[in-house]
Image (tube, rainbow, N blue to C red):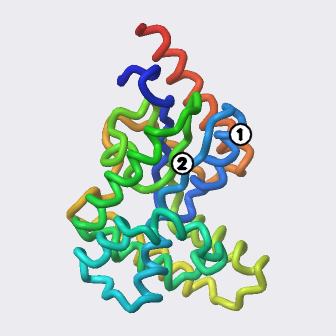
Amino acid sequence: MADCRSRPLIVAIDGPAGSGKGTVAVALARCLGFSYIETGSFFRTLAWRALDIRCALQDGLGLAAIVESVWFRQERHKVPIQALREERIGLAASEIGKISEVRAAFTIFQRQEVLQLRVPGVVIEGRDIGTALFPDADCKIFLTASVEARAKRRFLELQTKEREIAYAKVLEDLSQRDQNDKERVLSPLCPDTTYQILDTSKLSIEEATQAAERIVRKCLTDLRGRK
């Protein structure tokens, strides 16, 4: 473990789309009094910007240049959240996540964002936080669930937003994203032995959050015991 006095304590929450990691991570950060960062929003923002300025999603150097641009550092927060949640943006983000230049640029950018924080701790959620971005995270949790359970959650979420979409389409999109994430050469979505696995298929958000909090508190207790 890295010395937690030299940087915030880091809790990495990884997992596939629809596993509940976003909701659990937000609630967990609140329980712990930690800051919260969702790395997926960086990829979705890049996808939105690329489509907006007609940068090809296969242009690694062009995409990396967007990450390194003044626009990304200063203007990315102005993109409407609802735009980033569109299915086309999620699929595009999954595609660009396979590109080496993009992942290298984001690794530098996101590590700088976190390490400059002056906070006790941070909960970071995404798809390879504990393997690529912060392999030295103080606690790593991999949230998972069956693709059917995840598709049902996403379908119900879209219904509350009055989005007309078929469950079959949601299931197909999630399955495609899973395939993209698992088969990419760089940082495939696959937890290593340093993770605690938490299956949320049959858990409510409250139950999943409580289970995650127990895991984190044990990790932090063990960390203090090793000092």
x and y, in percent, of residue 115 in the image: 43, 38
Residue 138: quadrant of the picture: top left
Q: Nearer the viewer, residue 200 or 123?
A: 123
Disc 1 packing (10 Å; few <14; some 14–19; many ≥20)? few
The residue at which mark 2 appears reads as 199
Q: Residue at x 50, y 85 (%)?
A: 88
Q: Is residue 169 above or below residue 73?
A: below
Q: Which mark is residue 30?
A: 1
Q: Is residue 84 left or right of residue 189?
A: right
| Front label number (2 vs 1) | 1
x and y, in percent, of residue 213 in the image: 63, 33
Residue 130: quadrant of the picture: top left
Q: Amino acid at mark 1?
A: Arg
x and y, in percent, of residue 123 in the image: 55, 41
Q: Secondary structure at mark 1?
A: helix
Q: Residue at x 52, y 38 (%)?
A: 117
Give the mark, 2 or 1, whose residue is nearer the N terminus: 1
Question: In the rendered structure, are the residues bearing label 2 and label 1 in contact, judged by CB atoms less than 8 Å apart?
Answer: no
Q: Is residue 31 left or right of residue 52?
A: right
Q: Is residue 223 left or right of residue 85?
A: left
